């Protein structure tokens, strides 16, 4: 984040593709928990975005200016928040062996969602 920016909400979806995914949305000091069948990362994002609206945190998706996403393994190259660019995606691709279950899903999510 840069100066003047603030995180207004955090969402966490665990165990994607399992029978039941624990989901948590934090807004200020309030934490709301859910459980749902989340088959993939796209569904996870859609669920979080829909809940942000239902909980009244935002009124529509146009209010979202940025979304942060943690990549499990960025080696020594991705050790801080970065804007996803083609160079960043190439570096994640080079590091697939560090997290073979997670980094391919992250790349797929970035390409499908942002390009």
Image (tube, rainbow, N blue to C red):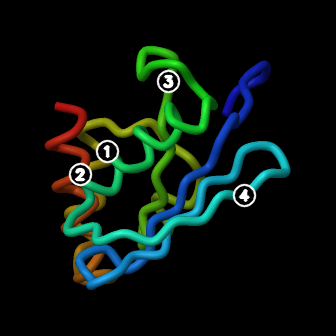
Tell me if 44 is positioned left or right of 83 in this view. left
Which of the two residues, 8 or 3, is positioned nearer the viewer here? 8
Report, in whole angstroms, how far the alpha carbon at label 3 lies from the one at label 2.
17 Å
Classify mark 3: residues with Cα within 10 Å, few (<14), some (14-19) or many (20+).
few
Is tag 4's residue or tag 3's residue first in the polypeptide sequence? 4
Q: Are marks 1 and 2 in contact (CB under 8 Å)?
A: yes
Q: Position of residue 103 (x, y in %)?
A: 28, 69
Which of the two residues, 99 or 11, is positioned nearer the viewer here? 11
Is tag 3's residue or tag 2's residue first in the polypeptide sequence? 2
In the orientation shown, which residue stands out farthest toward the top? 62
Is tag 1's residue or tag 4's residue first in the polypeptide sequence? 4
Q: Position of residue 83 (x, y in %)?
A: 44, 36
Taking the spot 72% from the left edge, 24% from the top edge, the residue there is 5
**Residue at mark 1:** 46
Classify mark 2: residues with Cα within 10 Å, few (<14), some (14-19) or many (20+).
few
Taking the spot 63% from the left edge, 31% from the top edge, the residue there is 57
Which of the two residues, 25 or 56, is positioned nearer the viewer here? 56
**Residue at mark 2:** 42
Classify mark 4: residues with Cα within 10 Å, few (<14), some (14-19) or many (20+).
few
Q: Are marks 3 and 2 in contact (CB under 8 Å)?
A: no
Is disc 4 placed on a helix, strand or loop? strand
Report, in whole angstroms, how far the alpha carbon at label 4 lies from the one at label 3.
19 Å
Q: In the displayed structure, would residue 82 be above or below residue 69?
A: above
Tell me if 27 is positioned left or right of 62 in this view. right
Figure quadrant of the C terminus: top left
Taking the spot 48% from the left edge, 59% from the top edge, the residue there is 70
């Amino acid at each position: 984040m840069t100066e003047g920016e603030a995180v207004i909400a955090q969402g966490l979806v665990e165990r994607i593709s399992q029978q039941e995914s624990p989901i948590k949305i934090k807004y200020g000091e309030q934490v709301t928990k859910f459980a749902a069948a989340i088959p993939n990362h796209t569904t996870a994002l859609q669920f979080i975005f829909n809940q942000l609206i239902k909980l009244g945190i935002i009124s529509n998706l146009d209010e979202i200016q940025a979304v942060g996403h943690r990549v499990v393994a960025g080696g020594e190259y991705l050790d801080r928040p970065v804007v996803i660019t083609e160079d960043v995606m190439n570096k994640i691709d080079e590091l697939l062996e560090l997290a073979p279950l997670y980094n391919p899903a992250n790349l797929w999510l970035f390409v499908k969602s942002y390009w």
